[in-house]
Every structure is written in structure tokens, then in C-alpha cells.
Amino acid sequence: MRRCVLSGLTLFATCALQMHGAASPAASPTPVVAAPVATPAAAPEPLSPTLPADEERAKRALESSPRHAEWVDVALPGSPTKLRTFVTYPERKDKAPVVIVIHEVYGLSDWIRAVADRLAADGFIALAPDMLSGFGPGGGGSDSVASRDDVVKLVRALTPEEVTRRLDALRAYALGLPAATSKSATLGFCWGGGRSFAYATAQPGLNAAVVFYGGSPETPDLARISAPVLGLYGGDDARVNATIEPAAAELRKLGKTYEVEIYEGAGHGFLRAQSGREGANQRHQHISS
């Protein structure tokens, strides 16, 4: 296993991909020369230069980003529904690994898109799908649902089989992009963190899975994991953290890689709410593996 020491939570995906032998993002990407455009709004002051914007700063971070981003509709085999996805690209000369960013139980949001943009800044092609595509009113997605409570209900109603089907379709699309390498990872938060972990049990071609405060799969499913997994958890999140040790024990027995980092004093959702818990949500340490 290659040793890596990284600061900044979005860079943990780099660590995971390096652990599996993937090409890492360029250290100093060369800017792409583009036609002059209107000067974007001033970027919000980040809480940390190595972290994505928090929820409060996400929209302004997106508006000020210099990176190319676009919306795509990814075909789902056997279905007229398309998976609405936000894609953002790094500025680099060579091809980039891809990271699928799986949203929280609150659906696709500006904050999740800002996480994708930060990953692109770190050298990845980042794709943030709206997993509710086609399930909202009139066949819409997250933004068609009237209330956050209704979004939560719809997200929780998604079956594991449907989630895997959608992630498989998106991964195939991503790896087919001309600017992409053959390496892929998932990175998810809360509900999406659990889905990132679960997808590693369902997709043998996955190169890495990053789990932000999401529950672990059932023990029998862990034998199917081949990708290294990184789990990042708040110390004050007993509900989720109760699932860590059973998974860790089983994966150790199986000889699989599962790196765990617990941030003492941080609560659930610490990356989105970085100002919370009197600063504990933003006190992140270096890791090594």
C-alpha cells in the first residue's frame, strides 16, 4: 500500500485512489486558456483552504468557481428516466480519475455541488447525481419536491437495487468520458455515505470508496468488497458509529482495507456544518495509511 498523508477532507479520495494504484491528480494543474468571460462574484472566505465550502458558502463558491461545470442527463438502461447529474472538470493536461459524489438524505443541493467543485479543484472529474431523478412530482428530481421532509421520505424509499443500478449507469458514463482515466471512486455523506460503502460491495471494479458519517453494510456483504474504504466520522455520532467496529472486525478478518478516522467532538454532518459544535466540526487532523 502506498503511504499518503493528506490534510483536507476532500483529499481523502486522493489517498484512497493512491492506495489502489490509481493515477493521482496533478500536483500543479496547468490552467486551461479560455475566452474572456465576465468576472465572477468574489469567492466567499473559506473556513479552510483545503475544504469545500460549507452549506452557508456553497452557492457563492459555485458562482465564483473558474472550473467548467455542466448538467448532463445519463441514460438508465431499460428506463425512460434520465439521471440528472452535475459534472465538474479539473484544469489539468492529463486525464483524471472520476469521483461520484453521493448526496445526503436531503437530496442534491448546492452544497453537494460545491463538494464536487472542490474535488475538481483537487484534480478529479467529479459527478454529483440527483438520485431522486424521476421520483419527484411530474417525474422531476430533488428540486421539484415541495419540502425537505418530503425529499427525505423519497430518498429513504430508494431501494438498494435502484441505487446500484443508477450508480452503475453513472460510473459507466463517467469512465467513457474522453478526459477520464479508468479509475473510479465514490464519496458520500450521511445517506450517501452509507450508499458509498454499500456500492463497494456491489461494484467489483470500484477503485475506492469514501464514507462520510454513513452506516456500514451488513456483515455478510463485506466479503464482496475489493476496493479500499475510508470512513470519516464525528465522535458524537453514536448511531452511525455503532456500525464501525462490526464492519472493521469483519474486514480485518477478510484482509480488506478499511481506514477509519473519528473527529472527537464533531457531530453528524460535520463537513456541511463546519461552524457547528463550537468549532469541533472543523478540527480535522492529518491521516496516514
Image (cartoon, grey):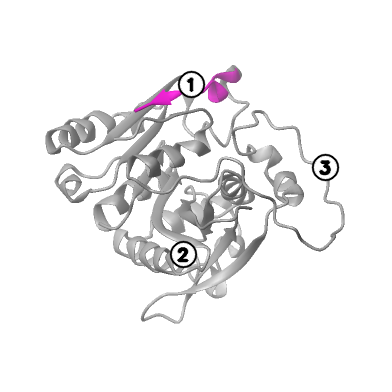
Q: Amino acid at mark 2?
A: Ala
Q: Is residue 93 left or right of residue 184?
A: right
| Residue 288 among magenta residues | yes
**Considering the numbered disc 1 on the image, is that residue within a helix, a strand or a loop?**
loop
> Mark on residue 174?
2
Residue 4, image quadrant:
top left
Q: Residues within 10 Å of mark 1 (few under 14, many from 20)?
A: few
Which is more N-terminal, label 3 or label 1?
3
Q: Which residues are magenta?
A: 279-289
> Mark on residue 285?
1
Q: Amino acid at mark 3?
A: Ala
**Considering the numbered disc 3 on the image, is that residue within a helix, a strand or a loop?**
loop
User: 67 and 239: which one is in front?
Assistant: 67
Q: CA distance from mark 1 to mark 3?
A: 29 Å
User: Which residue is labeled 3 in the image?
Assistant: 42
**Considering the numbered disc 2 on the image, is that residue within a helix, a strand or a loop?**
helix
Q: Amino acid at mark 1?
A: Gln
